[in-house]
Image: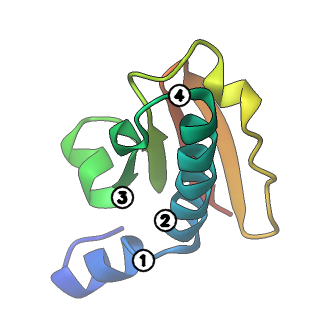
């Protein structure tokens, strides 16, 4: 659990945060191709997730203004160190294994 500033830095630079950031970059390219503003895409780290009351995810990608089913159009391939889950039509959560 993240309690000290040093622990927060470790949590906020985890493999899940890196995977979410990589996915967000892919999503930004997708947004540009289909005519949406890529600046609306956000990555939340563990600290932001807990402050927002979102629970157990280690990182999230949020796109509130995206087209319907965007989370199904851009596929994130799970890796050996990170899993991902579509939470709703506006967010995907990433978890360190």
**Around disc 3, counting alpha carbons within 10 Å, would you say few (fewer than 14), some (14 to 19), or many (20 or more)?**
many
Q: Which residue is mark 1?
A: 13
Asked if the residues shown at circle 2 and circle 1 are in contact, with their CB atoms under 8 angstroms apart, the answer is yes
Q: How far, Cα to Cα, is label 4 from label 2?
A: 26 Å
> Which residue is disc 3 drawn over?
45
Of callouts 4 and 2, which one flags the residue occurring earlier in the amino acid sequence?
2
Asked if the residues shown at circle 4 and circle 2 are in contact, with their CB atoms under 8 angstroms apart, the answer is: no
Q: Is residue 39 above or below residue 20?
A: above
Q: Which callout, 4 or 3, points at the residue further toward the start of the chain?
A: 4
Q: Secondary structure at mark 3?
A: strand
Tag on residue 35?
4
User: Marks 4 and 1: which is nearer the front?
Assistant: 4
Q: Specify the quadrant of the image occupied by residue 54.
A: top left
Tag 2 near tag 3, CB within 8 Å:
yes
Mark toward the viewer: 4 or 3: 4
- Compared across the picture, whether 79 is left or right of 58 comes to right
Task: Return the mark for residue 17.
Answer: 2
Instruction: Please name the residue shown 63% across and 52% down the image.
Output: 26
Q: Is residue 11 above or below residue 42?
A: below
Q: Secondary structure at mark 4?
A: loop
């Amino acid at each position: 659990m993240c309690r000290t500033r040093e622990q927060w830095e470790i949590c906020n630079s985890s493999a899940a945060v890196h995977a979410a950031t990589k996915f967000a970059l892919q999503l930004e390219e997708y947004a540009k191709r289909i005519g949406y503003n890529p600046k609306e895409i956000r990555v939340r780290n563990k600290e932001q997730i807990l402050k927002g009351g979102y629970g157990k995810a280690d990182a999230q990608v949020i796109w509130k203004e995206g087209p319907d089913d965007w989370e199904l159009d851009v596929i994130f391939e799970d890796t050996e160190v990170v899993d991902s889950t579509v939470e709703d039509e506006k967010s995907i959560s990433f978890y360190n294994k």
